[in-house]
């Protein structure tokens, strides 16, 4: 078993997959805490369906680099969804559900109406929804793009950490104290959209919420300050992603669902630890 | 000039006015209680004062070098906060956010002032505790400590004692009174008319009729007498 692992790890495409997987897991977990607390757990799901719809459009219209379409469309949807809650005419969960299923339906519809000559529709759709083996066939340029975007996300998160805390805990107080809440919400939306688009390669658009919510929920079972929850969820997410990818490489299971399964098991463990110890103060 | 002057203010949602032609002034060191029935627009007035929503008509003038960043706010608790993992210290420190601009981290000076604010509110021993595990009164003290860091001159409080037991309620009132004595201007929404009469210097009554004046004027006025006997009757029942 270990020999087999060693051989795999020496392959560059496996190394690429591991790097990208870990970075995506890290980024999505950082924002997960905020999203869960703001009651936006399903935004990952909603946005990834939008990204799916955009991917379908890109595929049908024959865009070679589909990022050019997918990223702006997803960012725009994120901004619409996260716009300060009170002003929206359709409230958070309903808005997400609406955009999510709408984009999913249109994406699938377009794929069927304009089938691409070279491929089978259900196969394509299935890989986009549940994550594909494409994580194992990454080109160097994609890996670099992912590394750069991840570094940006982490740096921005650290620089704005205290502000993100303030607007998550009490938006009204932050506005009254003169914080530019709208601006930071906009920043959050853009970052979230970027992460979702990146993460689609890893787990596919149906399972993306798992990367966002499981680390945060698990950390909240055990830890009680915002800082410790954030740090633990980052570690949790990275470990689960690594485990999931290694298992899937060794056993040959689908990458995305294996990672999510690892998240679920780890969540149950954290839940039990939280119940037994009553949580850890710091 | 007054610290805060409200002129011909109309407020409400989506151009539907709840309160019209509101006029009052707040001077430095005042203790103003805003009273009135449920739905009379008390919270809307406070949100408008805080610029959380814009007025339909009229204006709010700030004098004496009062800037928006000098106003502290003790909001009602939100659902999100009920299961929010945050330590007391983290929450109190976030009171500085409005003053920080783009600076990412808190300075030593700010951390020191946060400690002082917690000490003043008597919550230093709780500083590493988790907010959601505190009692209602302790949570209010945490939010007050946070508001103190944002407030230099004015503190707005939205029903600070709702849901607290009588002992904690009177402790909370004493705390607010001591802030007022130190020179902090207090503007408070209150359901508790007895306490409003006891502690405040001025009363603003909003509803179908509007009254603004000192506490003594209010007690003698028709609207004041009517409201007092009604609310007093409720408490006896």
Image (spheres, coloured by chain):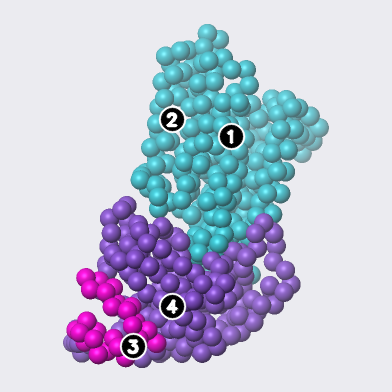
Chain colours: A cyan, B purple
Residue under the point 70% across and 35% down? A146
Q: Position of residue A69 (x, y in %)?
A: 56, 26
Marked residue chain, label 4: B
| Residue at numbered disc 3 | B215
Q: Are marks 4 and 2 on the same chain?
A: no
Q: Position of residue B112 (x, y in %)?
A: 70, 77
Where on the picture, by quarter, is residue B209? bottom left
Q: What's the distance in space between the residues labelled 4 and 1, CA to CA?
A: 52 Å
Q: Are marks 1 and 3 on the same chain?
A: no
Circle 1 crowding by C-alpha within 10 Å: few under 14, some 14–19, many from 20: many
Residue under the point 46% across and 61% down? B51
Q: Are marks 4 and 3 on the same chain?
A: yes
| Residue at numbered disc 2 | A103
Mark 4 vs mark 1: give the one in front. Answer: 4
Q: What's the distance in space between the residues labelled 4 and 2, CA to CA?
A: 53 Å
Q: Earlier in the sequence, mark 4 or mark 3?
A: 4
| Residue at numbered disc 1 | A197
Circle 3 crowding by C-alpha within 10 Å: few under 14, some 14–19, many from 20: many
Magenta highlight on residue B211: yes
Q: Is residue B234 left or right of residue A265?
A: left
| Residue at numbered disc 4 | B26
Dots 4, 1 in contact, CB < 8 A:
no
**Considering the numbered disc 1 on the image, is that residue within a helix, a strand or a loop?**
helix
Q: Is residue B10 left or right of residue B144?
A: left
Q: Earlier in the sequence, mark 1 or mark 2?
A: 2
A224 shown above or below B177? above
**First to last magenta residue range:** B201-226
């Amino acid at each position: 078993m270990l020999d087999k692992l060693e051989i795999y790890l020496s392959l560059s495409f496996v190394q690429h997959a591991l790097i990208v997987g870990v970075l995506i897991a890290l980024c999505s977990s950082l924002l997960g805490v905020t999203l869960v607390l703001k009651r936006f757990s399903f935004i990952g799901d909603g946005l990834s369906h939008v990204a799916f719809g955009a991917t379908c459009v890109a595929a049908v219209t024959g865009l070679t680099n589909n990022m050019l379409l997918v990223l702006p469309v997803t960012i725009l949807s994120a901004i619409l969804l996260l716009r300060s809650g009170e002003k929206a005419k359709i409230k958070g969960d309903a808005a997400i559900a609406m955009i999510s299923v709408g984009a999913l339906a249109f994406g699938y519809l377009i794929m069927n109406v304009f089938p691409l000559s070279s491929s089978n529709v259900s196969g394509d759709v299935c890989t986009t929804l549940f994550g594909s083996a494409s994580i194992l066939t990454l080109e160097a340029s994609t890996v670099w793009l992912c590394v750069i975007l991840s570094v940006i996300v982490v740096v921005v998160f650290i620089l704005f950490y205290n502000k993100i805390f303030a607007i998550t805990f009490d938006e009204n107080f932050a506005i009254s104290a003169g914080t530019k809440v709208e601006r930071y919400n906009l920043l959050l939306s853009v970052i979230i959209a970027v992460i979702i688009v990146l993460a689609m390669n890893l787990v596919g658009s149906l399972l993306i919420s798992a990367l966002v919510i499981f680390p945060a929920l698990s950390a909240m079972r055990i830890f009680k300050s915002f800082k410790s929850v954030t740090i633990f969820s980052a570690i949790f997410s990275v470990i689960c992603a690594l485990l999931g990818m290694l298992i899937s490489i060794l056993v040959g299971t689908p990458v995305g669902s294996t990672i999510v399964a690892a998240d679920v098991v780890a969540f149950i463990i954290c839940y039990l630890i939280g119940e037994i110890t009553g949580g850890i103060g710091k | 000039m007054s610290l805060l002057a409200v002129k011909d203010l109309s407020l409400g949602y989506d151009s539907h006015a709840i309160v019209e032609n509101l006029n009052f002034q707040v001077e430095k060191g005042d203790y103003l209680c805003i009273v009135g029935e449920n739905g009379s627009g008390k919270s809307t007035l406070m949100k408008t004062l805080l610029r959380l929503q814009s007025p339909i008509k009229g204006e709010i003038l700030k004098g004496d070098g009062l800037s928006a960043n000098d106003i502290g706010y003790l909001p009602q608790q939100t659902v999100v906060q009920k299961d929010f993992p945050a330590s007391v210290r983290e929450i109190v420190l976030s009171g500085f956010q409005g003053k920080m601009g783009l600076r990412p981290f808190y300075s030593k000076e700010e951390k020191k002032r946060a400690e002082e604010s917690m000490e003043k509110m008597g919550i230093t021993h709780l500083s590493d505790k988790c907010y959601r595990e505190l009692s209602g009164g302790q949570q209010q003290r945490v939010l007050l400590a946070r508001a103190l860091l944002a407030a230099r001159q004015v503190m707005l409080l939205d029903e600070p004692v709702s849901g607290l037991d009588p002992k904690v309620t009177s402790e909370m009132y004493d705390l607010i009174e001591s802030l007022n004595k130190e020179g902090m201007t207090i503007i408070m929404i209150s359901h508790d008319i007895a306490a409003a009469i006891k502690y405040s210097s001025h009363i603003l009554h909003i509803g179908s009729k509007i009254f603004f004046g000192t506490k003594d004027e209010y007690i003698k006025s028709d609207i004041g007498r009517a409201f007092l006997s009604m609310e007093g009757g409720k408490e006896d029942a």
